[in-house]
Image (cartoon, rainbow, N blue to C red):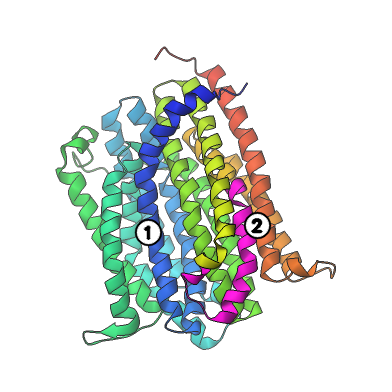
């Protein structure tokens, strides 16, 4: 039985929006980095934009994989917060930091040895060189980014996302002048083009970490968590618990993003215009994705806190309320994207050839909003229940198999019978849309089964 009641929406939606609002603003601030990078590099040169598309796709694939593992801290700490076991949160934070250190080393090794991934796109040596430099610079900022993800997970778990949002907005204010300085040059600094974006990002990443650490150290709110009360050596049992949940989450992120990464790398074979057009549309799609993502993070927080407080029925009610609200909102967004597609594209001011190539792709980012909302909401609810392995398998089969595999078959017309409209970049976007629909159906079914099992094995308590 679904414990979703329309009367609950009046209570659940304000709670979701209270948390999701700051998260969304912060996420948009971070995504604005990509928008600024794309728009400013597009004005520098088409080759630099192509290099940015390749390098950013590779970096995001690595970044979300390693940071996804750290995000396991959020549901674990959220359940502890709901159960009022505050002092245990500090120990979880310290162990997550050790885990982040190990993952940082892994990430840096991959970033500095990305030749095989760069060769897939078969671009010119000049573009490949710019992309390699971009990745090497970002490796310098990866330690700060990973430590920051620990702090972000903590703040989401304890319903205090506004702190992170404020720091992210300050960083956004710094991004534009730093981009101008390092992309185009000035103050005695020679312009670097696309790789200059990476220099700006690294400076801001370290600023974020130092600022947030200072806040956590001196604000009284964090004292019950005893984060800095003592030094902890690695506790392999706690780290293994984080890994058991975090590794499937990280791999799920990796699957989701690499489905787009390899789209970019394969579409690069169609030429610079195709790659640049795909980059613009993918960038806009990422901005829109922040809406269901923010609501899903807020949902995970509320559901995990309810589970920690042993309010199993309430946890399921919050989950279904979020599924209904998030999906309804994303349908509206999808319609608006299609109506204003030309206006949105003009914001990037691309060359005319790139603009003409990009317009048909808007049909797909408008269409798949409903599927994206359903799948991401269900996935984050399952993470609140500490269920991540089966969602990982669902993502692998749908996004890699149906999405990337089907997109490749259609995009390159492998069997010779693909309709013309679904060939080229359109085929990859169509495959991705179908894969999200399949993932949404399977994840929602898994959520329903998991919630029912939890209510049987965890008797509810009176609120």
Q: How many marks?
A: 2
Q: Quadrant of the C terminus?
A: top left
For the stretch drawn in magenta, the main secondary structure is: helix
Question: What percent of the width, then of the height, locates residue 354?
Answer: 57, 77
The answer, for residue 182, to whether it is visible in the render is yes
Residue 411, by quadrant, is bottom right
Question: What percent of the width, then of the height, locates residue 416?
Answer: 84, 70
Answer with left or right where residue 121 lies relative to residue 108: right
- Work out whether residue 70 or residue 256 is closer to the camera in this orientation and state it: 256
- Identify which residue is drawn at 83% across, 68% down: 415
In the figure, 89 relative to 189: above or below? above
- On whether residue 370 falls in the magenta region, the answer is yes
Earlier along the polypeptide chain: callout 2 or callout 1? 1
User: Where does label 2 land, which residue?
Assistant: 432
- Work out whether residue 333 or residue 461 is closer to the camera in this orientation and state it: 333
Question: What percent of the width, then of the height, locates residue 337?
Answer: 55, 57
In what element is the residue under mark 1? helix
Q: Residues within 10 Å of mark 2 (few under 14, many from 20)?
A: many
- Work out whether residue 438 or residue 307 is closer to the camera in this orientation and state it: 438
User: Where does label 1 land, which residue?
Assistant: 30
Q: Quadrant of the N terminus?
A: top right
Q: CA distance from mark 2 to mark 1?
A: 24 Å
- Identify which residue is drawn at 50% across, 64% down: 283
- On whether residue 24 falls in the magenta region, the answer is no
Specify the segment rendered in magenta: 345-372
Answer with left or right where residue 364 lies relative to residue 250: right
In what element is the residue under mark 2? helix
- Identify which residue is drawn at 64% across, 50% down: 436
The answer, for residue 238, to whether it is visible in the render is no
């Amino acid at each position: 039985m679904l414990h979703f009641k329309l009367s609950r929406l009046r209570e659940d939606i304000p709670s979701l929006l209270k948390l999701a609002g700051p998260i969304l603003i912060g996420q948009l601030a971070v995504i604005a980095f990509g928008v600024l990078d794309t728009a400013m590099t597009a004005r520098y040169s088409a080759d630099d934009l192509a290099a940015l598309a390749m390098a950013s796709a590779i970096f995001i694939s690595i970044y979300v994989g390693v940071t996804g593992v750290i995000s396991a801290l959020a549901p674990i700490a959220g359940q502890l917060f709901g159960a009022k076991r505050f002092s245990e949160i500090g120990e979880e934070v310290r162990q997550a930091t050790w885990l982040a250190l190990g993952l940082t080393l892994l990430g840096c090794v991959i970033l500095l040895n990305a030749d095989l991934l760069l060769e897939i796109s078969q671009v010119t040596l000049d573009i490949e060189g710019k992309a390699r430099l971009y990745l090497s610079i970002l490796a310098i900022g990866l330690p700060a980014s990973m430590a920051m993800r620990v702090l972000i997970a903590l703040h989401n778990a304890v319903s205090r996302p506004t702190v992170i949002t404020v720091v992210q907005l300050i960083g956004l204010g710094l991004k534009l002048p730093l981009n101008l300085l390092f992309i185009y040059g000035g103050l005695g600094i020679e312009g670097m083009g696309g790789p200059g974006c990476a220099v700006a990002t690294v400076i801001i990443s370290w600023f974020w970490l130092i600022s947030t650490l200072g806040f956590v150290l001196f604000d009284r709110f964090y004292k019950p968590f005893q984060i800095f009360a003592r030094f902890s050596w690695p506790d392999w049992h706690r780290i293994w618990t984080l890994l058991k949940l975090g590794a499937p989450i990280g791999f799920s992120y990796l699957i989701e993003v690499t489905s787009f990464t390899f789209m970019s790398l394969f579409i690069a074979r169609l030429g610079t215009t195709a790659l640049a057009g795909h980059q613009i549309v993918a960038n806009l799609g990422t901005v829109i994705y922040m809406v269901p993502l923010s609501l899903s993070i807020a949902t995970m927080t509320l559901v995990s806190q309810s589970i920690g407080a042993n309010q199993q029925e309430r946890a399921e009610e919050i989950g279904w309320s979020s599924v209904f609200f998030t999906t309804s909102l994303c349908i509206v967004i999808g319609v608006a994207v299609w109506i204003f597609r030309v206006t949105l594209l003009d914001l990037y001011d691309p060359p005319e050839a790139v603009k003409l190539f990009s317009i048909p792709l808007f049909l797909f980012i408008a269409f798949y909003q409903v599927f994206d909302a359903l799948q991401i909401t269900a996935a984050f609810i399952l993470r609140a229940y500490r269920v991540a392995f089966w969602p990982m398998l669902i993502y692998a089969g749908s996004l890699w198999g149906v999405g990337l595999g089907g997109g490749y078959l259609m995009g390159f017309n492998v069997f010779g019978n693909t309709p013309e409209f679904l060939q080229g970049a359109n085929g990859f976007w169509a495959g991705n849309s179908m894969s999200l629909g399949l993932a949404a159906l399977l994840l929602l079914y898994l959520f329903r089964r998991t919630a029912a099992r939890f209510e049987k094995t965890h008797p509810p308590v009176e609120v």
